[in-house]
Amino acid sequence: MAGTNRELADFLRRARSQGDPARAGLPPDGRVRRVPGLRREEVALLAGVSTDYYARLEQGRRITPSPAVVEAIGRALGLDDAGRAHLEDLIGLSAAPARRRSRAVQRVRPGLYQLLDALDGEPALILGRRTDVLAANRMARALFTDFDLLPPGRRNYARWMFLDEDARSLFVDWGDQARAAVENLRFDVGRDPDDRATNELVAELREHSREFDQWWVQHRVHQRTHGSKRLRHPLVGDLTVEYETLTLPGDPDTTLFVYTTEPDSPSRRAMDILASWAASGPSTGSRHQGDGPGNATRH
């Protein structure tokens, strides 16, 4: 099977294994379930397709369901919005344009660097495909790590999360944050399963991180839109930050992450102290010079 079909077959099998017959509205039939989740014929029944048709789809056969059938299968499997979008990508309803874009080197527009600098009181990152860190303002470098000091090919959020010991000690809820990074990377892979740079990153993380490998094979997907992170910063102590994500118009592969704290809270006071510390140090601005990700991102 081609890479896309392998990914689709694996995703459908694992999504079916996580299904709940009672929640799906299936009446008890008295049969002993030897494995957890839904049976193939049950998914087919709920989706309104034949068992043979669904079986061939789950086997990765070269068939392309209509959008209505894909939507019905997503409902039958109980997929959330990210799961349904991932299913559409794997089947091919929306993946082709993303694959053509993925071959180009990502660059950050000058106006976006200016935007990062204007947000200097709050940490902000711009992430690209496969969670490559394309740019970071001074506060983001102070809060997380100075990605500018990393070799260009290693400026990647997921890689830092799993292979840098400082990241493990920084996040109080490292397990939750790391797992979300895996599930978000899985979502990206669905948009272009054959991208060489992404597959090399996944292979590296699976080889060097037991947790990453364990979560990767579960094939769960997640698209980060907002949330919170609890940190234990070596300079300012414990704080909680909320984040919002903005997908940039005209460039769906590039996302702006902005981190804020609750006004008049201990976290806000910690952030203000961090801002004072960051302002007293050497300022390199948000722009990567020469060897930055925009010029050296893997492709």
Image (cartoon, rainbow, N blue to C red):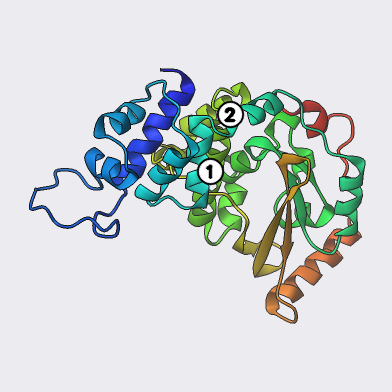
Can you tell which quarter of the image residue 10 is in? top left
Task: Look at the numbered disc 2 and give the secondary structure of its residue.
Answer: loop
Where is the C terminus found, in terms of image quarters? Answer: top right
Give me the C-alpha separation between circle 2 and circle 1: 13 Å
On screen, residue 62 versus residue 153, left or right, reads: left
Q: Do the residues bearing badges 2 and 1 touch, measured as CB atoms within 8 Å?
A: no
Q: Where is residue 250 in the image (x, y as percent from the top left)?
A: 78, 40
Neighbor class of circle 1 (other Cα within 10 Å; few <14, some 14-19, many 20+) is many
- Check disc 2: other Cα within 10 Å, few if <14, some if 14-19, many if 20+: many
Which one is in front in this view, the residue at disc 2 or the one at disc 1?
1
Where does residue 86 sit, x and y in percent of width and height?
A: 51, 40
Q: What quarter of the picture does the N terminus occupy? A: top left
Is 245 or 4 nearer to us in this picture?
4
- Disc 1: which residue: 85
Label total for image:
2
| Relative side of 135 to 265, left or right | right
Lateral position of residue 95 relative to residue 244, left or right: left
- Nearer to us in this view, 6 or 274: 6
Q: Quadrant of residue 100?
A: top right
Residue at 25% from the left image edge and 46% from the top image edge: 38
Q: What residue type is labelled 1?
A: Ala
Q: In which quarter of the image is residue 128?
A: top right
6 or 61: nearer the eye?
A: 61
- Determine whether, in the image, residue 237 is placed left or right of residue 40: right
Examine the rendering and report whether any part of residue 18 can be seen: yes
Number of the label disc, if any, that sits on residue 184: none
List x then y, in percent, for residue 180.
Answer: 52, 50
Query: Mark 2 sits on what residue?
Result: 192
